[in-house]
C-alpha cells in the first residue's frame, strides 16, 4: 500500500465520507490495478467524483477547476514532457507571470511541485481536477489521437467515397503526407458519425489548428493535429468534395457522399472559408437514416400537433416555420412533406442546398451564380401545375411576393424565415414590403421552434430545483408542485455530458380571424403576441418549461435556447 493512498484513504475515512470496509476493498483493488485510490473509490461507487474533488480541495486548500470548461493554453501544456505529465497526472494549464498553474488529480503529491519547478523554472501553483478530465486533456494536447497507425485501426467500417474525382498528383501539398492525411480525413468523417456529431469544424490559427465537433447543438474540441497537416487536410477534403484546390481566396461549397458499412449512405455538406491563417472548413453531416419524419416523435405537444397537421392539410395558404440556423426547421418541413407525399399531388421544392432526397418529390437545387434563385424557381414552379410548393427560405421581397400570390391562387406553400418567434414573423413580412391584406389572407399558421438537448436516459436522475428558480423562469405555483425536474449525471453513453439527442420546442400560432383583423389594423409584434396567447398559443419558453416538468430537458437548457415572455 502506498503512503499517499493510505493518507487520502484515512482522510476520507475520518471525514465519514467512506466506510472502513470500502477503504479496505479499495486498497485491495489498488494493489492489483495500481490506480489512484480516489479513482478506485469512485469506480466502486463509494462516493461521487464531485464529492471527492470537493473534499480534497477543502483538505489541501486547493481550488477545484472543471477542465472541460477551461480554456487551456497549448503552449503552456508543452512546457512539461508527456511522460512526466502521464506519470504524475499533472497538467500545466496556464501561466501567470512567473507562476505556472498545474492541474493535478492527487493534491497529496507535494513532490510534484519541486519536480515541475526544477524542470520549468517557474513557481508552481496547484489546482485540482478530475482524473478523467486530465486524461482527456492529455490525449488532446499531446497528439495521442494522432498516432496514425492507431487511427487506421479505428476504421472498423468500410468506407467508400461516391463519385470521387481522380486522385492523381493534383494535390502537391499532400504528397509528402499522403497516407497520414488520407487516414486523418477518413478518421474524422467516421469518428464524427460514431459520436453523433452534426458538424465538423476544422479551424486554422497562427501556430496550430484544431478540430471541433458539434454534438447536440454544442461544440466540443476533439483534437489539435500537427500544424504541418493543416493545408494538406483541407486539400484532401476539397478533392473529396470536388472543389478547386488551387482556389484559396474565395469561399467554396461542395458535397461528399460516403458509403459507410452495409449500405448506409452519409452526405457531408462542405463549406470552405478563407481566413487570415488559412481555410476554415465546416462539414455538415446529413444522415438520411437518422432523419426523424414522424411528427409525433419530434417533440410536439398534443394540441400544437393537431393545429400543425390541420394547417398542412388545407388545400391552399402559407405555412411558415421560423427559427435560427440549426433549429430543425428543415426537419419539420420534411416531416410535413413526407405526410403530404401522395401520388395524387404534385410537390415541388426549391432548396439551398437539397439536404435529403425524397422519392415522389421534385426537388430543385438553387444555383444563384447562374440565375437560378428562389424567385426564379418559384416562377417556374407555377408553370409546372403544382399542388404543394416548398421554398427553402424566404430571403427577399421578390420571393415573398411570389410565395404569397401562390398561396392565394390555390397552392399550399411551405417555407422558412429567420425570426425570433412566431408573432415577429408578421412584422418581418410587412418590413419586406408585403401588404398587410396579403399577409392576413395568405397565412394559415406560423411555427417557431428551437432545439434543446435531451437528458440522457441512461444516467438520468431526479433533481431538486429551488421553486424560486422555476418561478423566475416563468412557471406558476401549480406547475411547480407537479414538476419532476431531472438531470443527467454523465456516463459513457453521453460522453459524460448528461445529454443525448435533442428535443424540439414549438410555438404554434394559427392565424385565426381575430389575428387577421389585428394584422390588417397594423398591430405591432407585441400586440400580435398578446392576442395569440389570449387565443391559446403556448410560447417557446412555456413549451420548454413543460419539458422541464416532464424531466425531458433541464431548466438551464430551456433558459439557454428561449427568451423571457
Image (tube, rainbow, N blue to C red):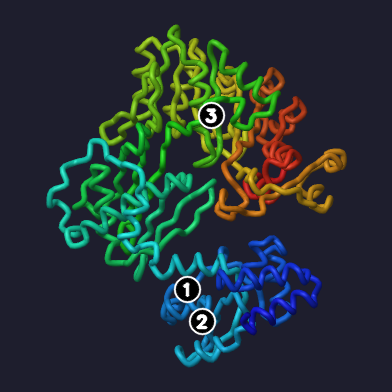
Count the labels in the image. 3
Give the SS element for disc 1. Answer: loop
Residue that lies at the very extreme toward the left in this rendered image: 169
In front: 10, or 179?
10
Disc nearer the start of the sequence (2/3) = 2
| Label 3 – label 1 distance at C-alpha | 41 Å
Q: Earlier in the sequence, mark 2 or mark 1?
A: 1
**For the residues marked 2 and 3, what is the alpha-carbon distance in whole angstroms?**
48 Å
Q: Residue extending furthest top?
A: 344
Residue 183: mark: none
**Distance Cα–Cα, label 2 vs label 1:** 8 Å
Residue under label 2: 95
Q: Residue at x 45, y 30 (%)?
A: 397
Asked whether 24 or 9 is in front, the reply is: 24
Residue 249: tell me if it is visible.
Answer: no
Secondary element at tag 3: helix
Which residue is identified by label 3? 332
Q: Name the quarter where the C terminus is drawn.
A: top right
Q: Mark 1 and mark 2 in contact (Cβ < 8 Å)?
A: yes
Disc number at residue 73?
Answer: 1
**Image height check: is 268 above or below 488?**
above
Amino acid at each position: 500500500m502506498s503512503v499517499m493512498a493510505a493518507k487520502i484513504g484515512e482522510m476520507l475515512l475520518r471525514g465519514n465520507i467512506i466506510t472502513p470496509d470500502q477503504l479496505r476493498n479499495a486498497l485491495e483493488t489498488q494493489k492489483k490495478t495500481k490506480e489512484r485510490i480516489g479513482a478506485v473509490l469512485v469506480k466502486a461507487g463509494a462516493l461521487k467524483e464531485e464529492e471527492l474533488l470537493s473534499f480534497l480541495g477543502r483538505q489541501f486548500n486547493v481550488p477545484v477547476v472543471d477542465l472541460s470548461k477551461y480554456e487551456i493554453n497549448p503552449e503552456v501544456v508543452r512546457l512539461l514532457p508527456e511522460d512526466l505529465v502521464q506519470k504524475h497526472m499533472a497538467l500545466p494549464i496556464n501561466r501567470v507571470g512567473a507562476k505556472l498553474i498545474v492541474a493535478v488529480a492527487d493534491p497529496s503529491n507535494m513532490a510534484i511541485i519541486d519536480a515541475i519547478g526544477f524542470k520549468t523554472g517557474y513557481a508552481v501553483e496547484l489546482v485540482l481536477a478530475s482524473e478523467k478530465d486530465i486524461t482527456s486533456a492529455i490525449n488532446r494536447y499531446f497528439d495521442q489521437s494522432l498516432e496514425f497507425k492507431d487511427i487506421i485501426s479505428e476504421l472498423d467500417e468500410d468506407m467508400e467515397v461516391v463519385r470521387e474525382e481522380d486522385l492523381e498528383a493534383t494535390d502537391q501539398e499532400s504528397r509528402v503526407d499522403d497516407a497520414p492525411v488520407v487516414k486523418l480525413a477518413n478518421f474524422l468523417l467516421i469518428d464524427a458519425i460514431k459520436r453523433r456529431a452534426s458538424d465538423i469544424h476544422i479551424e486554422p490559427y497562427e501556430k496550430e489548428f484544431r478540430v471541433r465537433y458539434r454534438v447536440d447543438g454544442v461544440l466540443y474540441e476533439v483534437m489539435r493535429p500537427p500544424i504541418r497537416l493543416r493545408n494538406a487536410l483541407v486539400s484532401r477534403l476539397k478533392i473529396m468534395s470536388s472543389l478547386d484546390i488551387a482556389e484559396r481566396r474565395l469561399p467554396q461549397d461542395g458535397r461528399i457522399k460516403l458509403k459507410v458499412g452495409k449500405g448506409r449512405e452519409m452526405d457531408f455538406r462542405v463549406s470552405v472559408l478563407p481566413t487570415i491563417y488559412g481555410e476554415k472548413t465546416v462539414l455538415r453531416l446529413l444522415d438520411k437514416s437518422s432523419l426523424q419524419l414522424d411528427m409525433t416523435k419530434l417533440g410536439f405537444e398534443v394540441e400544437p400537433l393537431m393545429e400543425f397537421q390541420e394547417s398542412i392539410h388545407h388545400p391552399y395558404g402559407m405555412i411558415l416555420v421560423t427559427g435560427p440556423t440549426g433549429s430543425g426547421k428543415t426537419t419539420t418541413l420534411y416531416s410535413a412533406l413526407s405526410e403530404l407525399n401522395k401520388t395524387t399531388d404534385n410537390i415541388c421544392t426549391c432548396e439551398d442546398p437539397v439536404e435529403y432526397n425524397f422519392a415522389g418529390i421534385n426537388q430543385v437545387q438553387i444555383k444563384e451564380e447562374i440565375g437560378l434563385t428562389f424567385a426564379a424557381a418559384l416562377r417556374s414552379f407555377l408553370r409546372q401545375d403544382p399542388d404543394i410548393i416548398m421554398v427553402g427560405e424566404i430571403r427577399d421581397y421578390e420571393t415573398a411576393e411570389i410565395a404569397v400570390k401562390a398561396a392565394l391562387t390555390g397552392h399550399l406553400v411551405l417555407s422558412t424565415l429567420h425570426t425570433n418567434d412566431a408573432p415577429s414573423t408578421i412584422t418581418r413580412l410587412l418590413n419586406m414590403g408585403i401588404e398587410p391584406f396579403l399577409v392576413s389572407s395568405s397565412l394559415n399558421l406560423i411555427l417557431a421552434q428551437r432545439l434543446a438537448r435531451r437528458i440522457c436516459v441512461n444516467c438520468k436522475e431526479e433533481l431538486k430545483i429551488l421553486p424560486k428558480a422555476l418561478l423566475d423562469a416563468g412557471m406558476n405555483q401549480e406547475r411547480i408542485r407537479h414538476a419532476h425536474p431531472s438531470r443527467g449525471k454523465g456516463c459513457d453513453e453521453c460522453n459524460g455530458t448528461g445529454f443525448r439527442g435533442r428535443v424540439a420546442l414549438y410555438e404554434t400560432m394559427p392565424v385565426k380571424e381575430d389575428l387577421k383583423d389585428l394584422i390588417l389594423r397594423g398591430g405591432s409584434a407585441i400586440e400580435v403576441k398578446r392576442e395569440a396567447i389570449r387565443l391559446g398559443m403556448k410560447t417557446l419558453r412555456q413549451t420548454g418549461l413543460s419539458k422541464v416538468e416532464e424531466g425531458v430537458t433541464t431548466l438551464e437548457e430551456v433558459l439557454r435556447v428561449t427568451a423571457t415572455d
